[in-house]
Amino acid sequence: MAARTVQSLLKGSDIQYRVDMPDELWPCRVDPQLMARALEYVIINACEAVSQRKDGMIVLAFQNLSIESIEKDPDDNRSKI
């Protein structure tokens, strides 16, 4: 979904981009429409910033993130975008 969203937003643009998504990324439960909308806003904002530079590139990076908290299960895991 992330790569498709970036591709559709940057179609016909000169802006370079890269999507870094590791194969071992944990599955996430998200609303696909809300996630696509959030990514859309991030990419549009990044496009505005990158368009002011000649050598700019947008990098959308995903990673796993472990969270340890007193209130939560110490084995609670998250993914970070």
Image (cartoon, grey):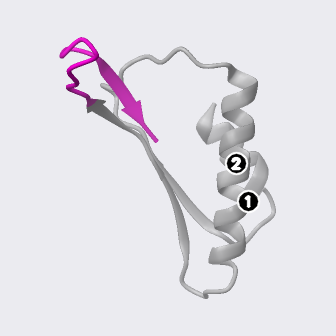
* Horizontal side of residue 56 vs 5, given as left or right: left
Q: Which residues are magenta?
A: 66-81
Depth check, mark 2 against mark 1: the one in front is 1
Residue at mark 2 to residue at mark 1: CA–CA distance: 12 Å
Q: Nearer the viewer, residue 13 or 30?
A: 30
Within the image, what quadrant is residue 80 found in?
Answer: top left
- Locate residue 7, reporting x and y percent: 70, 48
Within the image, what quadrant is residue 62 found in?
Answer: top left
Instruction: Identify the residue at horizontal 29%, vertical 33% (top origin).
Output: 65
* Horizontal side of residue 32 vs 75, given as left or right: right
Instruction: Identify the residue at horizontal 20%, vertical 20% (top origin).
Output: 70
Instruction: Identify the residue at horizontal 61%, vertical 86% (top origin).
Output: 53
- Locate residue 26, reporting x and y percent: 36, 20
Residue 52: mark in rendering: none
* Horizontal side of residue 53 vs 19, given as left or right: right
Which quadrant does the N terminus fall into? top right
- Locate residue 15, reporting x and y percent: 66, 70
Relative to 68, say whether 48 is above or below. Answer: below
**Residue type at numbered disc 1:** Ile
**Residue type at numbered disc 2:** Gln
The outermost residue toward the front is 71
Residue at the disc numbered 1: 44
Q: Is residue 69 magenta?
A: yes
Instruction: Identify the residue at horizontal 72%, vertical 73% (top origin).
Output: 48
Q: Is residue 75 magenta?
A: yes
Q: Main secondary structure of the magenta part?
A: loop
Q: Nearer the viewer, residue 35 or 57?
A: 35
* Total numbered labels: 2
Residue at the disc numbered 2: 7
Relative to 13, say whether 32 is above or below. Answer: above
Relative to 57, say whether 79 is above or below. Answer: above
